[in-house]
Amino acid sequence: MEDDRAEIIAAYKRALHMAGNPLARDRAAWRQAEAQASRTLADLVASLRAGAVLVADDDTAFPCGTGPQDPHPTDSWHAAATFFEIALTHVLRRMKDSDHPPEMITLVTVALHRSISRRVEEFCFTHSGFLLNRIHEAHLEERRRIARELHDRVGHDASMALRHIELATLSQDDPAQATRTLKVAQEAVQEILRSVRAVTSDLRLQEPLASLEKALEIFVESVKTPTTDVRVQVNGDETWAPPEVRDESFFILREAIRNAVRHGVPSLVRVRIDIAPHELHAVVEDNGCGFEGGSPARPGGAGLCTMAERAHLVGGAVTVTGGPGLGCKVELVVPLARRPSRRRR
């Protein structure tokens, strides 16, 4: 077994390449996967020598995604199953060439299973901790966003309304001027109501979306302005996308629409979502002012990072393109049937 280690690991890497598993292409992920495989083979050797299952108590785990560019958890679980098949097939083929009691086959199978399961369990704990941290950060960012909304929009409009009411009071000797001032105050109060509705509508989404299209239409009503037309078009059957994909897609598209209306100052924002059995593809495109340098990255701009992280959680990706005077385009792609189909190869 010790002599066959390199052969088994090479076969393991070839199998991952053939399956299109990104663990075989990413150097850091492959080093971690290779270390896990070596540790599992060491457990197998120790078990064969002892005649009983022995699994080292260490923290060697399958590669764990902790960022938008890291391998998806499904890739790690697929890699674990692949290694079990490769290692067990190799060992059983070797055992056929020599005389071994039937109990040895059971020992090999159980030892491999327990060693790999131990590392999958470590992976699950690590990844669960990562997800909990991301959820906590998302909660904090949402609180900061609501605070910014209340301060920048509601607070500003409330101050404006109060100031114009005071001016109207001081303009009692000029009824026409007082009327104009009160009109401005009335418009500021109406803007406050729109802002409050926008904030509260964001907080209502607690249950899984029944309809992505309907949720976006409701949100659009709360953010569109007299000078900005927002159009939503959804093609395909929404049931092809799992509930978690619809939910995360809504949050991503909501942020993209909000950014377009607020920062791009466009006259038109188009939202198109195409849902097929294999993929959800969405585009939010506006004809606003765009941004410098072909990239919207800004210091402290957490919205774009949050969109990328939400997409990663469902195995998707977000790209943002545009330029000065060319508007902005946000594209979301989430594969729906890619991973199951890969297992059937």
Image: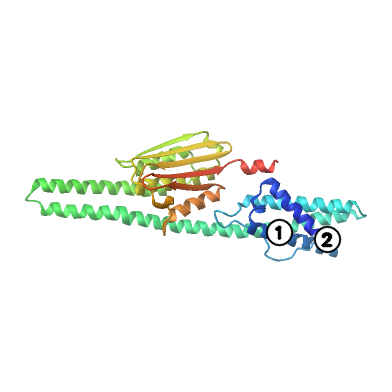
Q: Amino acid at mark 1?
A: Glu
Does residue 297 appear in this view? Answer: yes
Q: Amino acid at mark 2?
A: Asp
In the rendered image, residue 127, in percent from the top left (x then y), is placed at 60, 57
Res 34 label: 1
Q: Residue at x 47, y 56 (%)?
A: 138
Q: Residue at x 57, y 58 (%)?
A: 66
In the rendered image, residue 46, in percent from the top left (x then y), is placed at 81, 64
User: In the figure, residue 217 lies in which quadrant?
Assistant: top left
Which one is in front, 312 or 5? Answer: 5
Sequence-wise first label, 1 or 2: 2
- Tell me whether circle 1 and circle 2 mark residues in contact (CB < 8 Å): no
Above or below 309: residue 281:
above
Q: How many marks?
A: 2
Q: Residue at x 18, y 52 (%)?
A: 164
Above or below 54: residue 213:
above
Query: On the rendered image, what quadrant is the N terminus found in?
Result: bottom right
User: In the figure, residue 52 lies in which quadrant?
Assistant: bottom right
Q: Residues within 10 Å of mark 1 (few under 14, many from 20)?
A: many
CA–CA distance in space, label 1 to label 2: 16 Å
Does residue 205 appear in this view? Answer: no
In the rendered image, residue 112, in percent from the top left (x then y), is placed at 77, 56
Query: On the rendered image, what quadrant is the C terminus found in?
Result: top right
Above or below 100: residue 216:
above
Which one is in front, 97 or 162? Answer: 97
Name the residue furthest top.
236
Q: Residue at x 24, y 49 (%)?
A: 188
Q: Say whether residue 245 is left or right of residue 190.
A: right
Q: Secondary structure at mark 1?
A: helix
> In this figure, which residue is indicated by the disc labeled 2?
3
